[in-house]
Amino acid sequence: MKIVQKICLVLTIIGALNWGLIGLFEFNLVDTLFGVGSILSRIVYILVGLAGIINIALLFEDWD
């Protein structure tokens, strides 16, 4: 499960960086790379969203 969590963490960081770029510069890197509304952009957004949901489990792990 550790590998899945690391992959999800990387995807969540990518999503956060993209939102930071949108907020600061009105620049959407995902849409720039894959095209606005393209299937690849949608896949990236879906993967980032799923990764965020999976990372919620980290809040409930034992931190010892």
Image (cartoon, rainbow, N blue to C red):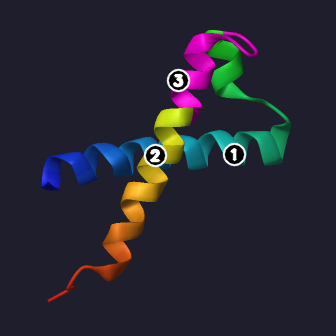
Bin the neighbour count of mark 1 within 10 Å (Cα to Cα): few under 14, some 14-19, many 20 and up. some
- Of marks 3 and 1, the one in the foreground: 3
The residue where tag 2 is placed is 50
Q: Earlier in the sequence, mark 3 or mark 1?
A: 1
Q: Earlier in the sequence, mark 2 or mark 3?
A: 3
The answer to whether the residues at label 3 and label 1 have Cβ atoms under 8 Å apart is no
The answer to whether the residues at label 2 and label 3 have Cβ atoms under 8 Å apart is no
Residue 58 image-quadrant placement? bottom left
Left or right: where does residue 39 sit relative to residue 35? left
Q: Amino acid at mark 2?
A: Leu
Hey, which residue is sitting farthest bottom in the picture?
A: 64
Dot 1: element: helix
Please count the marks in the image: 3
Residue 39 magenta: yes
What predominant SS class does the magenta segment belong to?
Answer: helix
The residue where tag 3 is placed is 43
The residue where tag 1 is placed is 19
- Spot occupied by residue 29 in the image (x, y as percentages of width and height): 66, 26
- Spot occupied by residue 41 in the image (x, y as percentages of width and height): 61, 20
Q: Amino acid at mark 1?
A: Trp
- Residue at (29% x, 43% y) in the render: 7
Q: Which portion, as a residue range, is magenta?
A: 35-45
